[in-house]
Amino acid sequence: MNFQKENTEQGGLRLVADAKDNIKLPELEKQFVNFTFFRVNSDWRKLDTESKRLYKLEFQKVFNDFSRDFLLYSYSLVGFDSKADLMFWRIGNSLDLIQEMSAKMYRTSLGGYFETVDSHLSVTKGMMFVGGGAEDRLHVAAGEKKYHFIYPCAKHRDWYEKTVEERDILIEEHFMVGKRFQNIKIHLTHSFGFSEQEYIVSFETDEPKDFLALAEELRQTPASKFALRGMPVYTCRQRTLAECLDALG
């Protein structure tokens, strides 16, 4: 799904035109990318059906009110992960709006049952693992696949003792492995300064088995030796917000 939006607005998100439009894209500002993971309190499942219905409608209204300001995607982790039940992927050009949206979600009745398990903030930069066509390397063309695997990534100190040229060679080799998996879209955004990790790497695909094969190959590359272990990897299934909320029980 590639989108195009009028450049006349001062706020909001200006997005990538579809390849068939054959439009030359202007140089645009970087985007902020946020992955937020929630776990629902068990008390939610004890509520009566009517209360759940009303609470979900209230929450959906708040979510939809920000659809003009972000690319918004909702993912269910129910049955996949014990740490989180729900993930929102938000892409926009305003940190203030990310905070405003989060605060309004928490103020809803359903938000009172949510606990934030993890929240990763990053920014797009010139070097991203994206495809060709009309996409540029500063903007995320998102939400094309069913499954999304999120991997916060930090490097050992030894990584920074290498020269820029040596690091570029290792990254390029890493990148070429990913290019062989044409049905997997890889996003690399930068979080250095926002948190302890340097990058957020995420993988979109319709076939989880292909991601497992890619992950196994990437583990064999020389660059993988410099990655810190122990960071969570999340497996997410894209659903409509209504479907995600229904899955909470």
Image: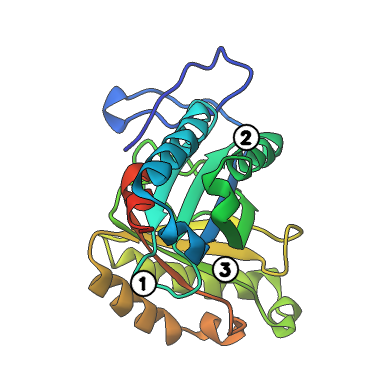
Q: Which residue is mark 2?
A: 93
Q: Which residue is mark 1?
A: 80
Which of the two residues, 12 or 161, is positioned nearer the viewer here? 12
Mark 2 or 1, which is nearer the eye?
Answer: 1
Could you classify mark 1 by the number of other residues whose Cα lies within 10 Å: few (under 14), some (14-19), or many (20 or more)? few
Inspect the image, locate mark 1, and give the three-letter code of the amino acid beneath it. Answer: Phe
Do tag 3 and tag 2 residues touch (Cβ < 8 Å)? no
Locate residue 105, reporting x and y percent.
58, 41
**Quadrant in which the N terminus appears:** top left
Tell me which label, 2 or 1, sits earlier in the chain.
Answer: 1
- Which disc is residue 152 wearing? 3
Disc 1 element: loop
Disc 2 element: loop
Tell me which label, 3 or 2, sits earlier in the chain.
Answer: 2
Q: Is residue 154 shown above or below 119?
A: below
Do tag 2 and tag 1 residues touch (Cβ < 8 Å)? no
Residue occupying image coordinates x 41% and y 48%: 74
Q: Quadrant of residue 109?
A: top right
Inspect the image, locate mark 2, and give the three-letter code of the amino acid beneath it. Answer: Asn
Which of the two residues, 242 or 110, is positioned nearer the viewer here? 110
Inspect the image, locate mark 3, and give the three-letter code of the amino acid beneath it. Answer: Pro
Q: Quadrant of residue 75?
A: bottom left
Q: Quadrant of residue 36?
A: bottom right
Q: Is residue 42 visible?
A: yes
Give the residue furthest to the top.
8
- Estimate the spatial distance between the alpha carbons at disc 3 and disc 2, rounded to whole Å: 21 Å
